[in-house]
Image: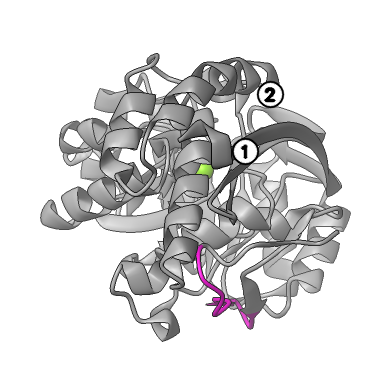
């Protein structure tokens, strides 16, 4: 198998257009790891967007990928499920690295069959979701500017969870009355404070609130859900499929990300499991390029909400892929995940 196989990975720094601030901290760039899998003249692209919240960095991704190379070299990539199991079993965690491999394998698999991923999954590409556009925490002046720049998006996701929530929302509402959702990124530590925030947000055309409190505070979030009217969506509380049943009492829905799940195959399992529990499903992303965002967009006909704007927040995307028109995700018709290198 190995003689016509080439496996390559490299760290690339993605620069954010604007400093990105959420309740956990600020950043100006992200170091993501890009994977290229080539066999029989067909190339698959993948990407890892490691997030320190889950104990990952570009370094941990590279270390894991080095261990994965021999497994990839000796396995038949047409047997996706077996390869995925072999990679998953190498080490626990490392989900963004596993996602990079799984995305690249599915890209390679679909290109080998000359079909787009949505077609492989039996999905209608016209049923893609409308994506939120995310507004990071900032000064009221900058928030107004960012909201005005996002005028083409019918719904915005506003980051909250710090001291200046009221100021941020007031700034948003001074320039638009369009629907918004709020992502607190675990920022509210006290359940009474969180309840006040949710009650205050109600009546401000808010669709839902994402991860109001820390993932460790599941019973507090369940307490909150019993008292608040706004739907509550899990993000940091949900990583993989086996987390979901336990969350059904505390959350109305879940935010699934390829980078948390460890790839497309686990994301599909999570989508079907959440549907069986009548939970709302959002497909989200980290700060990532058009590789991982395009891969996720291919699955978006299956979900209620998409938050797939990571590639729109960076100014040196090394790939082109999914595009957005008035918020609607437009899938490329190329085989695979639909991502093409820019150089
Ligand atoms: Mg979130």
Residue 58: assigned label: 2
Of tags 1 and 2, the one toward the viewer is 1
Query: Where does the magenta region start and end?
Result: 325-336
Indicate the position of residue 116 as horizontal and vertical percent values: 46, 71
Q: Nearer the viewer, residue 168 or 61?
A: 61
Instruction: Please tell me how many numbered marks the rendered image carries.
Output: 2
* First reached walking from the N terminus: tag 1 or tag 2: 1
Q: Nearer the viewer, residue 325 or 219?
A: 325
Q: Is residue 103 left or right of residue 268?
A: right
What distance separates the C-alpha of mark 1 from that of mark 2?
21 Å
As displayed, is residue 285 above or below residue 74? Answer: below
Q: How is the image coloured?
A: one colour
Q: Is residue 330 covered in magenta?
A: yes
Q: Nearer the viewer, residue 79 or 287?
A: 79
Residue at left offset 68%, top offset 17%: 59
Residue 6: assigned label: 1
Indicate the position of residue 286 as horizontal and vertical percent values: 60, 43
As displayed, is residue 324 above or below residue 170? Answer: below
Q: Is residue 207 covered in magenta?
A: no
Most frequent secondary structure within the magenta stretch? loop
Indicate the position of residue 83 as horizontal and vertical percent values: 34, 35
- Quadrant of the image occupied by residue 146: bottom right
Q: Residue furthest left?
A: 276
Residue 248, visible in the rendered structure: yes
Quarter placement of the N terminus: top left
């Amino acid at each position: 198998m190995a003689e016509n196989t080439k496996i390559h990975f490299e760290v690339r720094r993605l620069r954010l257009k604007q400093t990105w601030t959420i309740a956990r901290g600020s950043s100006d760039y992200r170091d993501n790891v890009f994977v290229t899998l080539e066999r029989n003249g067909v190339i698959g692209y993948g990407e890892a967007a490691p997030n320190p919240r889950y104990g990952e960095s570009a370094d941990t991704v590279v270390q894991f990928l080095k261990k994965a190379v021999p497994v990839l070299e000796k396995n038949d990539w047409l047997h996706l499920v077996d390869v995925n199991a072999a990679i998953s079993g190498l080490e626990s965690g490392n989900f963004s690295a596993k996602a990079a491999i799984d995305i690249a394998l599915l890209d390679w698999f679909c290109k080998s069959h000359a079909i787009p991923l949505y077609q492989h999954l039996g999905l209608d590409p016209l049923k893609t979701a409308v994506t939120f556009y995310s507004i990071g925490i900032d000064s009221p002046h900058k928030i107004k500017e960012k909201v005005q720049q996002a005028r083409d998006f019918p719904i915005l996701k506003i980051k909250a969870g710090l001291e200046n929530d009221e100021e941020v929302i007031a700034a948003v509402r001074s320039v638009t009355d369009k629907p918004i959702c709020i992502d607190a990124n675990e920022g509210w530590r006290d359940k009474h404070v969180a309840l006040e925030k949710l009650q205050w947000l109600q009546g401000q055309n808010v669709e839902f609130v994402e991860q109001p409190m820390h993932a460790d505070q599941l019973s507090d979030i369940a307490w909150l859900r019993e008292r608040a009217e706004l739907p509550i969506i899990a993000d940091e509380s949900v990583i993989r499929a086996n987390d979901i049943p336990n969350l059904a009492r505390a959350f109305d829905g879940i935010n699934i990300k390829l980078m948390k799940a460890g790839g497309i195959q686990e994301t599909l399992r999570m989508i079907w499991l959440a549907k069986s529990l009548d939970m709302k499903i959002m497909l989200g992303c980290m700060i990532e390029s058009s590789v991982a965002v395009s891969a996720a967009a291919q699955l978006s006909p299956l979900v209620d909400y998409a938050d797939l704007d990571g590639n729109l927040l960076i100014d040196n995307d090394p790939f082109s892929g999914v595009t957005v028109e008035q918020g609607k995700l437009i899938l490329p018709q190329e085989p695979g995940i639909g991502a093409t290198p820019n150089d």
